């Protein structure tokens, strides 16, 4: 579970996040929504401990996010919008590299499990320079899933992907029924397909809705459908 209490974040004199309160319960899939510059990246970086908390508190699965205590990191995995893969390595070799960055020896059975989950097992021996954008994104998701964290934070996981690639990513996300997910997105159609709730940022303030409530009460010309 993610719990944010009275979070304030400022850059200079500009207050970006203003008294943010948010709870994302176990196995919820919550979309993080807001126009460009609303503070989505600031919130994500705060949740990941990459940005020190100005005022307030953040807890991950009941553990306070602080510099001194990093045990909460085991509960959370992050897929950035843009990430670095090695184009001359195969999909399996990329996964092995990142797996062995956090443990001495990669778990072969676990790697097969996550590659099958994202439908890349049959393409595991192909160099990723030949992967489509959708395949690259699914490989990034496999690397994220390998950590077996209970909470996933996904930053625009379908950004720049063609309709078929988006469909494949959404199908994978729908299958992750045992995960708690915070999903940054500006596509209303994918929010309605995979999310249970919406955390909406506007003018530094946040409100949380069910997806049905959000779609019924917000006319967002800046977001795409």
Image: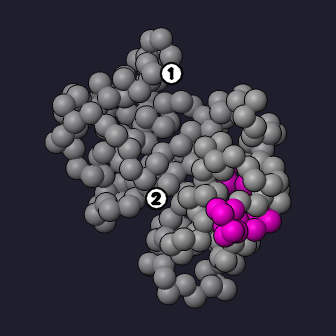
Asked if one can make out residue 206 in the rendered structure from this viewpoint, the answer is no
Instruction: Answer above or below: position of 14 versus 50.
Output: below
Mark-to-mark CA distance, 2 and 1: 24 Å
* Nearer to me, 108 or 3: 3
Residue 211: within the magenta?
no
Instruction: Answer above or below: position of 180 versus 144.
Output: below
> Which residue sits at x=64%, y=62%?
11
**Quadrant assignment, res 7:** bottom right
Helix, strand or loop status at disc 1: loop
Q: Is residue 58 left or right of residue 36?
A: right
Q: Which mark is residue 164?
A: none
* Nearer to me, 204 or 219: 204
Q: Which residue is the site of mark 2? A: 156
| Rendering coords of residue 132 (x, y %) | 23, 50
**Mark earlier in primary sequence (2, 1):** 1
**Quadrant assignment, res 216:** bottom right
Q: Is residue 193 left or right of residue 116?
A: right
**Quadrant assignment, res 205:** bottom right
Q: Which mark is residue 102?
A: 1
Highlighted range, magenta: 10-32
Q: Quadrant of the C terminus?
A: bottom left
Residue 12: within the magenta?
yes
Instruction: Answer above or below: position of 88 versus 133.
Output: above
**Colour scheme of the picture:** one colour
> Which residue sits at x=76%, y=61%?
8
| Rendering coords of residue 54 (x, y %) | 75, 53
């Amino acid at each position: 579970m993610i719990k944010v209490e009275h979070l304030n974040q400022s850059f200079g004199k500009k207050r970006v996040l203003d008294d943010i309160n948010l709870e994302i319960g176990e196995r919820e899939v919550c979309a993080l929504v807001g126009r460009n510059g609303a503070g989505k990246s600031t919130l994500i970086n705060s949740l990941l401990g990459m940005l020190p908390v100005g005022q307030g508190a953040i807890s991950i699965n009941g553990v306070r996010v602080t510099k001194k205590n990093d045990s909460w990191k085991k509960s959370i995995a992050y897929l950035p919008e843009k990430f670095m893969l090695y184009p001359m390595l195969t999909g399996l070799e990329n996964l092995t590299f990142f797996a062995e960055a956090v443990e001495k020896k990669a778990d072969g059975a676990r790697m097969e499990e996550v590659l099958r989950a994202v439908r890349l097992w049959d393409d595991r021996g192909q160099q990723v320079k030949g992967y489509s954008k959708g395949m690259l994104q699914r490989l990034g998701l496999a690397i994220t899933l390998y950590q077996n964290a209970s909470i996933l934070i996904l930053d625009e996981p379908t950004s720049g992907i063609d309709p078929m690639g988006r469909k494949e990513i959404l199908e994978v996300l729908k299958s992750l029924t045992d995960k708690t997910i915070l999903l940054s997105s500006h596509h209303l159609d994918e929010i309605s397909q995979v999310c249970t709730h919406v955390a909406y940022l506007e003018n530094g303030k946040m409100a949380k809705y069910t997806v049905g409530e959000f779609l019924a009460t917000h006319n967002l010309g800046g977001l795409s459908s």
